[in-house]
Image: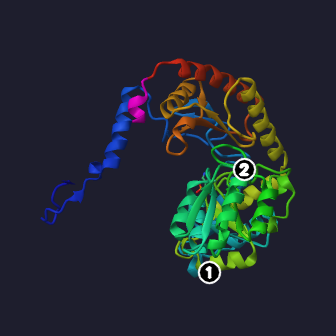
Amino acid sequence: MRQGTGSANGTDAKSFDFGSLPQVKQLMMQRALADRMGIGNPFFRPHDALAAGETLIDGRRYDNFASYNYLGLNGHSHVVEAAKAAVERFGTSVSASRVVAGERPFHGELEHALADLHGVEDAIVMVSGHATNVTTIGHLLGKSDLILTDALIHNSVSEGARLSGATRLNFRHNDLEALQNLLVANRHKYERVLIAVEGIYSMDGDFPDLPKLLALKQEHDAWLLVDEAHSMGVMGNTGRGIAEHFGVDPNAVEVWMGTLSKTFSACGGYIAGSKALCDYLRATAPGFVFSVGLSPALGAAAIASIEVMKQEPERVASLQENGQRFLEKAKAAGLDIGPSAGYAVVPVIVGDSPRAAILSNRLLERGINALPIIFPAVAEKSARLRFFITSEHTFDQIDRAVEIVAEELAIVRGADYDVSALLA
Ligand code: PMP
């Protein structure tokens, strides 16, 4: 099908109507049905404020559990001043790939700070966390290799695995025996094997047994990638992540991955590890070489965030206390929080996508912003609301949120919504 009118130069060329694609039609139909059911769209709501423990939507104030501003560093005066100074000095863009004319002093400074934080030799920063996983995994592995991923691994790792052309097998979430079985059965068929896990899983809020993973990867001569998007600044006494939590040598992990968008209140991603790994990626990773360098405000904000995190370790302690508080209160209220360990991510399992969306909207009416995670991001039966906990929340906010969620969930569960059409 075609749409559009002829162009100004008199040809009758028309652009393709993407609305005619079956998958687009299906999306539109689901939205129309959701509208008819009065579910409303909980996504893409503009926040008119710095979203920390509180936020502002449509002029109304909400307790906010939907932003991963884990240590409250977004908007911190030191971070804002550093970003401003960087913009004044370097402008808003570095205007080139770092390989050519885009290298600025803050790039090296940030990489040094990240390597130091992880306790490894080097780090390399890229312009997006998602792209960091895609390009790194896509580039390091190839057709003769195997990638073993936890079933709940982030989409960016899956996309990287797809790009690499390697064989990819999933093991059941956090089931290291299943991983071992896959290693025993398959290791000999492949040149290299990469095991990919998260420091804290973004959907379930739990974490893997890192010492066991290290023993397994050693025994089977595999590489280990740990995505610390949700564990950096969150786990360990000083927030240095899952290695600090377990007291293991960070140099035993081949590839540390992290983002600048969460604890570090900027945007971008990084790989930390050996100098050889980072140098190789700097010279050859397509998503680094053929992409612009991280922009000044973001680089400076991330550096300043790391400084504040080191100077104010009480932020990490308060995030951890808040996470435990939410966990305990939710358990006491009988909520299904899955296997969450009560750090920065606590899900409340609802059971189907429409009810998760309805619950989110009902919470909003009661002054609480928490977003639904629905199929296909998670299995339909484990559709949920996901609560991000930060150092900025108060115990009062947490207690009130849990109380209201329990009340509203009981109503939503009991109501007779005909959701079958939406699930078809
Ligand atoms: N890894 C994980 C585990 C994530 O949850 C995310 C995004 N939330 C990313 C990578 C991508 O990071 P970014 O949003 O900074 O691109």
Q: Is residue 241 visible?
A: no
- In the picture, the quarter occupied by the C terminus is top left
Picture coordinates of residue 207, whole percent (x, y): 73, 49
Front residue of 164/100: it is 164
- The quadrant holding residue 82 is bottom right
Question: Residue at (68%, 34%) from the top-left corner?
Answer: 337
Find numbered disc 2 in the image and state the secondary structure of the residue it sits on.
Answer: helix
| Viewer-nearest residue: 27 or 261 | 27
Does 388 appear above or below 283? above
Q: Indicate the quadrant where residue 189 lies.
A: bottom right
Relative to 299, 12 lies left or right: left
Amino acid under disc 2: Ser
- Left or right: where 45 falls relative to 422: right
Q: Amino acid at mark 1?
A: Ala
Residue 383's place in the image compared with 188, above or below, is above
The picture quadrant where one finds residue 410 is top right
Q: Ligand 1 is in which quadrant of the figure?
A: bottom right
Q: Mark 2 and mark 1 in contact? Answer it, CB < 8 Å.
A: no
Q: Few, some or many C-alpha atoms within 10 Å of disc 1 (few <14, some 14-19, many ≥20)? A: few
Mark 2 or mark 1: which comes first in sequence?
A: 2
Which range of residues does the magenta coloring cover? 418-424
What residue is rendered at 81% in x and 38% in y? 321
The stretch drawn in magenta includes residue 392 = no
Taking 31 as reference, is 407 above or below it?
A: above
| Residue 414 point in image, percent of width and height | 54, 18
Helix, strand or loop at disc 1? helix
Residue at the location (68% across, 22% down)?
Answer: 403
Q: Position of residue 126 (x, y in %)?
A: 61, 67
**Nearer-the-camera pick, 314 or 269:** 269
Q: Which residue is disc 2 drawn over? A: 77
Dot 1 corresponds to which residue?
A: 283
Look at the image and name its color scheme. rainbow
